[in-house]
Amino acid sequence: MLLKDIYSWIFILIASAMIAVGRVYDERLEIGGVNFSIILSSLFIIFSIPLFSSVKSFKINSSKRYLFGFLALIFFSPILWGFYGLTEYGIEKYVNFVVIIIPLVLISSIFKHQDVKRLFEILLYFILFLAILGIIKVGSSVERLSVLGGGPIVFARWMIIGVLIVFFLKKRNVKNIMLVGVFLLLSIAAGSRGPVLSLFLTIAIFSLINFQKLFFKLIIIGVIAGSLFIAFDGLDVKNLGKADRLTTKDSRSKNARLIFAARSLELCSMYPAGVGLGNWQEYCNKTTPHHLLKHQYPHNLILEVFAEIGLLGGIVLLLLIVKSIYFTFVRMLKYSKENSIYELLFYLQVFLLINSVFSGSLNDSRLLFIVIAISLIAEPLLPRKLDA
């Protein structure tokens, strides 16, 4: 039992690193002529094999049929390349999804409560590490806040994921309230509207669901606001990193996404079976050659799947999302007094889904798919001995 527990710790540690990196090969992780992403990917594959062999069968029950159906559509999507060609970007997307996301989704779909909690705790340490790097950089750079090669959107998203993990998984003491405040300020300093707006909408949904407890929530918010005021007295938030971008009336990002949406819908109407992974940009430019796009994906997970995998893939994805959110919501209410993990899973899904519509992509949404897989586990994820 001890050996199994140690193995679980090592695998979840490696899996968390793969979730953070998101690539089989990443040139940013080359140090001293050694590329650590290749080493990490190799270890991930090696440690995944025994877990796959230990599971006799992945039961395709009613809660998981859309999940496995969607994974199958992605897995067999290279068929579309035979009709529409392939690009280096498409191959990269496919390899990352098949090698990283599919194994993580399948293995996480058999997690127990302790495995899920362990995963989020390790991810929280990674987010804390990013936050420390962010604090160092925010005072020494005039560029938009980003660390370890990830962009401002990715950095802000990780900070807000940290906010949700601490808020729903940890005790609400002074230390954790201050930690939430630091993550929030760093997400604002990144100057990315998508993650911040997604958090705002998630908070709005949280307030609606917990309307009867609103007075208590207002007290919590007041404590957080007071703590922030004391800790950051005199701080001009607009001068923090690129926080001013959140209030400037620059509509270029919004207009670009509206164009992406229109071009994606046009592509869907012309190629209802999809154009293949990685071909969104090429076929958008072919259909409208007088208005070329330099972006490789539409910054919207759902539109990306509809355009590249086809109407069937998009519909299966939508059914999967609706099923997962409803399933998690019901369990969140059912086990609200059981100290369950469903509240975190539900609001993580809400935030990640909203964010994926503003600035997401298929590979970039790896944590969303993992959270969905965990949420759809048939046995209740409760902190009980029988769940261990």
Image (cartoon, helix red, strand yellow):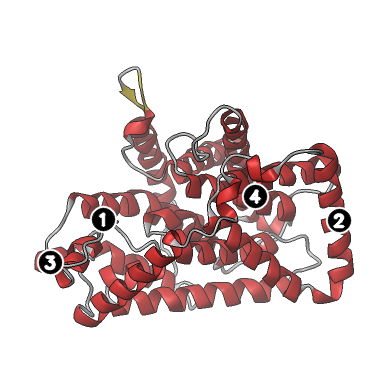
Q: Is 127 or 104 nearer to us in this picture? A: 127
Residue 25 relative to residue 387: left or right: left
Q: Which residue is mark 1?
A: 294
Name the amino acid, label 2.
Gly
Q: Which residue is mark 3?
A: 84
204 above or below 91?
below
Q: CA distance from mark 1 to mark 4?
A: 40 Å
Crowding at dot 2, Cα within 10 Å, few <14 / some 14-19 / many 20+, comes out as: few
Q: Secondary structure beneath disc 3?
A: helix
Residue 384 locus on image (x, y percent): 74, 57
Crowding at dot 1, Cα within 10 Å, few <14 / some 14-19 / many 20+, comes out as: few
Q: Secondary structure beneath disc 4?
A: helix
Residue 304 relative to residue 203: left or right: left
Q: Which residue is mark 2?
A: 222
Residue 360 locus on image (x, y percent): 43, 59
Q: Which label belongs to residue 117?
A: 4
Q: Is 141 or 6 nearer to us in this picture? A: 141
Mark 2 or mark 1, which is nearer the start of the sequence? 2
Q: CA distance from mark 3 to mark 4?
A: 43 Å
User: Is there CB contact under 8 Å for labels 3 and 4?
Assistant: no
Q: CA distance from mark 3 to mark 2?
A: 56 Å
User: Is there CB contact under 8 Å for labels 1 and 2?
Assistant: no
